[in-house]
Amino acid sequence: MNTQTQSTHPEQARLGGFTWALALIPLLILGAALALIVATGGGLTELSGPPVEQVTFQRVMLPEPGVVQVVVINDGPQEVTIPQVLVDDAYWSFTAQPSMTIPRLGRATFTIPYPWVEGEAHEVMLITSLGTTFPAEIPVAVETPQLSMSLFLQFGLIGLYVGIVPVTLGVLWYPFMRRLSGQAMNFILALTVGLLIFLAVGTFLDALEFAGALPAFWQGVPMVAFIALIALGRSSRWVTCAGSAKPLRWACPTGSHWGSASITWARGWRLAQRLRRAKRRSARS
């Protein structure tokens, strides 16, 4: 037995270096192939098409009266030069930071001194050196809010109204819900699950809408679908309704304050019922 064990160790040691060599050979071949393609084009230069220019608008801002700022990203495979800008079908002077030539995946900010009119619609169009146009519409001209303490407090009030106030009102229902029957709790749970599903579908659709406006290299829509599948798989669990022997499998997002509070109340109600039953059993015994 010991002889066989000792004889296998040298064989494993000999196979170790050979195994690493087998793993490195494909990587070396892959590296050589990639270097050949990068250096010479791999014989595919005749298949290359015309230059493709793609610019995505990130933001169109009106920081102050008489000024329009446009932030764009070069979403194409090559650098893009934007030497001309039109505002409402008229050429206007502008300044570009850091440059009019935007490298691939680069970003630039164009500042245009234009006397925009509050409440009216305007259109900004960027023209590349190859003549490609990229328009951006301002449906209603309103000065862009600047970061300040008052703006911070306003967003804090929004968080208070949509977050803390609904949860507080929901917690006040807990004493009432403790006195409900099993059928009433099943109805509340069914209502909560329906609300969660509605919110999940609405959130998913909004995420798809926002992802569609992102630059193509970010792959926004596939990323949203991937995150949704991960969230669906992690949140799927067995939820047993009170008074029912059949478990229901639900995939519920946890972003709804009302839904989370209702589920918490339901768990507390079930725990209270179990404690009451245990007390009755101990009293009978």
Image (spheres, helix red, strand yellow):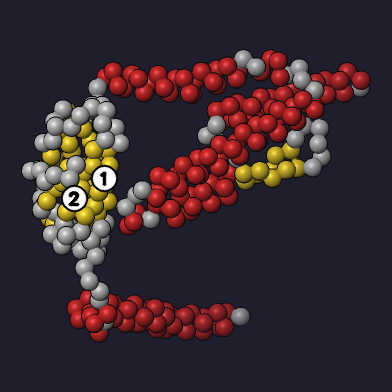
Mark 2 neighbour density, 10 Å: few (under 14) some (14–19) many (20 or more): many
Q: Is residue 144 above or below residue 198?
A: above
Q: Quadrant of the C terminus?
A: top right
Q: Which mark is residue 126?
A: 2
Q: Amino acid at mark 1?
A: Ala
Q: Amino acid at mark 2?
A: Leu
Q: Is residue 138 above or below residue 44?
A: above
Q: Pick whichever, 92 or 200, lies toward us.
A: 92
Query: Residue at 59% of width from left, 30% of height from top?
Result: 260
Instruction: Please tell me whether mark 2 sits on a helix, a strand or a loop.
Output: strand
> Quadrant of the rendered structure where residue 172 is?
top right
Q: Quadrant of the N terminus?
A: bottom right
Query: Residue at 62% of width from left, 33% of height from top?
Result: 195
Question: x%, y% of residue 226?
Answer: 48, 53
> Quadrant of the rendered structure where residue 16 is?
bottom left
Question: x%, y% of residue 139?
Answer: 30, 36
Q: Pick whichever, 283 or 133, lies toward us.
A: 133
Who comes first in sequence, dot 2 or dot 1? 2
Q: Which residue is mark 1?
A: 136
Q: Is residue 258 above or below residue 168?
A: below
Tell me: 152 left or right of 4.
Answer: left
Question: x%, y% of residue 81?
Answer: 13, 57
Instruction: Please tell me whether mark 1 sits on a helix, a strand or a loop.
Output: strand
Query: Residue at 65% of width from left, 36% of height from top?
Result: 194
